[in-house]
Every structure is written in C-alpha cells, then in structure tokens.
Image (spheres, rainbow, N blue to C red):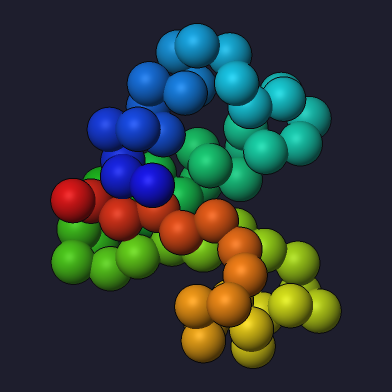
Amino acid sequence: MSVADAERYIEEGQFAPGSMLPKVQACLEYLADCPSGKAIVTSLEKAKDAIEGKTGTVITVD
C-alpha cells in the first residue's frame, strides 16, 4: 500500500490501536525520513519471506 493509502486507512480507523496502528505509524515515520525505501510489517518468523515479497504488508511512498 502507499503512504497515502495508509494515512487514509488510519483516518478511517481501520487499524486497531493496540495492534497494526502503531506498526503502520512507525512505518510512516520511517518513510518520511527515507522516502526511497519501503517498510514491511510482518512477524520476525516470516521476515525472510517478507523480504522476498512472499508475505507481509508493504508500505511505499508511491
């Protein structure tokens, strides 16, 4: 998803405050400082698969 999508979903209340919301907010903070990067929300156990694009929620600036 894009940063714009994530911001819209936050405004709509689609991320639970004690679950995905803080993770997505941290990704948005990272991307504000590193707009050419991408952020992935996943579990540590699935990190390798997420880096390979197989799982996780990817947030990019586009």
Q: Position of residue 52 (x, y in %)?
A: 51, 86
Q: Position of residue 36 (x, y in %)?
A: 18, 66
Q: Position of residue 32 (x, y in %)?
A: 26, 48
Image quadrant where residue 45 sits: bottom right
In this orientation, does residue 33 appear?
no
Taking the spot 63% from the left edge, 27% from the top edge, the residue there is: 15
Q: Is residue 41 above or below residue 3?
A: below
The answer to which of 33 and 45 lies nearer the viewer is 45
The answer to which of 52 and 36 lies nearer the viewer is 52
Q: Position of residue 17 (x, y in %)?
A: 71, 24
Residue, far front: 54
Taking the spot 55% from the left edge, 56% from the top edge, the residue there is: 57
Image quadrant where residue 35 sits: bottom left
Left/right placement of residue 52 relative to residue 47 reads: left
Taking the spot 31% from the left edge, 41% from the top edge, the residue there is: 3
Q: Is residue 53 above or below residue 37?
A: below
Taking the spot 40% from the left edge, 53% from the top edge, the residue there is: 59
Left/right placement of residue 55 relative to residue 1 reads: right
